[in-house]
Structure formats: structure tokens, C-alpha cells
Amino acid sequence: MYRRLVLKLSGQAIAGPDEFGFNSDRLTHLANEVIALRATGVQVAVVVGGGNVFRGNRADDWGIDRVEADNIGMLGTVINAVLLRGRLAALGAHGVRLMTAIPIDNLAEPYIRLRALRHLEKGSIVLLACGNGQPFTTTDYPSVQRAVELEADALLVAKNGTDGVYDADPNKHADAKRFDHLTYTEVIDRGLGVMDQSAFILARDHHLPLHVFDIDRTGAASAIVNGTQVGTTIM
């Protein structure tokens, strides 16, 4: 039974079927999934992405350098986290704390590891935005980094419309095989695209279990906590 988990939510999860923007129904679904996850009795932290607002890798399209583009992307994670906090509150969730790697005092608390741990121990849902405050990283690396820092038992890697890790793209190959279990070595040897390589290596080095699952499936995250095999487990 897990005691503490970090859930990685991408900006795409908030956008829903659209590439960019926001979807109110999707936001409600995600908020309900987070509430249900805490209701299992585990401590929950959520790393929020911002790709639905702006992606740093589109810097050239906008004629700006990559550092500035990534700064915009980090601000996008704050927008998503404030949206999620608001929807959680509207659904009756208590004790929701938003912490950012870049100080934005009027909106959130600065991320301080020991303070975040204290919030989790008191049963609060801790939303984590701005990645790790540095450019040149996607949400993958900060999600693993925060999970390790906060001594989480596992990282739940929420995917949109994909129910785990496959040996080929299931949208292009009808015979693609989904794996129930993988080791870190198997993922690397097979070249499977679970997350950024630097993030995956960090997870491997710290023996952090990863659960890759479809966030569209209602109750999937809670089922993982209860011991049900959902998606792909990597450890």
C-alpha cells in the first residue's frame, strides 16, 4: 500500500481533445480523479504541465530564444495549477496548496521541500507548478525530481488516451503490444518512449516505481493505489 504519491499531469490533459487551450469538462474530470486519489488515504502531490498554453520547443516559431520560451511555458503551468486549484475547491476539496518553483507570492507559496512535506503529512493536496524553475526541461524531469525529493513511493505518469507503454505506436500499429510490467533496463534497451531520458535515468537511479496509465479512465489512479494492475508498471 502506497503512503505518498506524485501524479504527473500534462497540459494536454487539461486541453482535452484540442492541442491547446482549456476544456472545462476535462478540468472537472482531473479534479475528481485527484480527489478520489486522496480519498484512498494516500498523500498526493501533483506536478502540473503547461504544454496547452505554450511549449518551449516552439521558440523558433515565435522568433524568441529557448530560455524565454521555457519561461513562458513555466508560467503556463501556473495558469493550469490555479485552474485546477479553483476546480478542486469548487468540488469541495479542502486543504489544497499550490507551490511554485519560481516565487509568485500573490498566487502561491514558494516551493520549499520541507514545507511541502509538512503539507502532505497534514493531508493537503499539494499542486506543484513551474517545473523546477529552470529552462531546457519538460515536465518529465521535475516530476521525477519532486517525487524523489518528497520521498514518494511512486510516480503516476498520466497519459491522455494511451493506457500504458507499447512496443510500437498503437495509433499507427494495430498489432502493437502493451506491456503490463517492465524493468528500467528493458525500457532503455528497447528504446521505449516513456519520458525524457534524463528523467527516466533519474527514476532508475533512485529506484522510483513508475505507473504509466490513461488518465481518461475514471478511477484508474485510485485503482493503482488499491493494488489493481492498470497500465504499465516500471520498476
Image: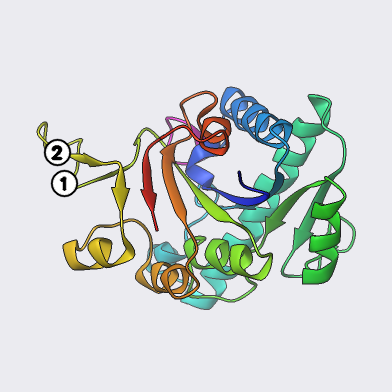
Residue 181 locus on image (x, y percent): 31, 47
> Measured along the vertical axis of the image, is residue 208 above or below residue 66?
above
> Measured along the vertical axis of the image, is residue 200 above or below residue 84?
below
Residue 61 locus on image (x, y percent): 38, 63
| Label 1 secondary element | loop
Label number found at residue 176 = 2
Disc 1 or 2, which lies upstream in sequence?
1
> Measured along the vertical axis of the image, is residue 95 above or below residue 16?
below
Q: Residue at x 11, y 31 (%)?
A: 174
Amino acid type of the residue tagged 1 in the rendering: Ala
Seen from the viewer's position, the closer of residues 18 and 102 is: 102
Q: Tell me whether the residue at label 1 lies in contact with that at label 2, contact meaning CB atoms closer than 8 angstroms.
A: yes
| Label 2 secondary element | loop
Answer whether residue 51 is visible to the viewer in this image: yes
Seen from the viewer's position, the closer of residues 32 and 2 is: 2
The crowding category of the residue bearing disc 2, from other C-alpha atoms within 10 Å (few below 14, some 14 to 19, many at least 20), is some
Q: Residue at x 71, y 37 (%)?
A: 38
Answer whether residue 112 is visible to the viewer in this image: no
Label number found at residue 168 = 1
Q: Residue at x 50, y 52 (%)?
A: 51
The crowding category of the residue bearing disc 1, from other C-alpha atoms within 10 Å (few below 14, some 14 to 19, many at least 20), is some
Tell whether 116 sits left or right of 16. right
97 within the magenta span: no
Most prominent secondary structure in the magenta stretch? loop
What span is colored magenta in the figure? 15-20
Indicate the quadrant where residue 213 lies. top left
Amino acid type of the residue tagged 2 in the rendering: Ala
Label number found at residue 17 = none
16 within the magenta span: yes
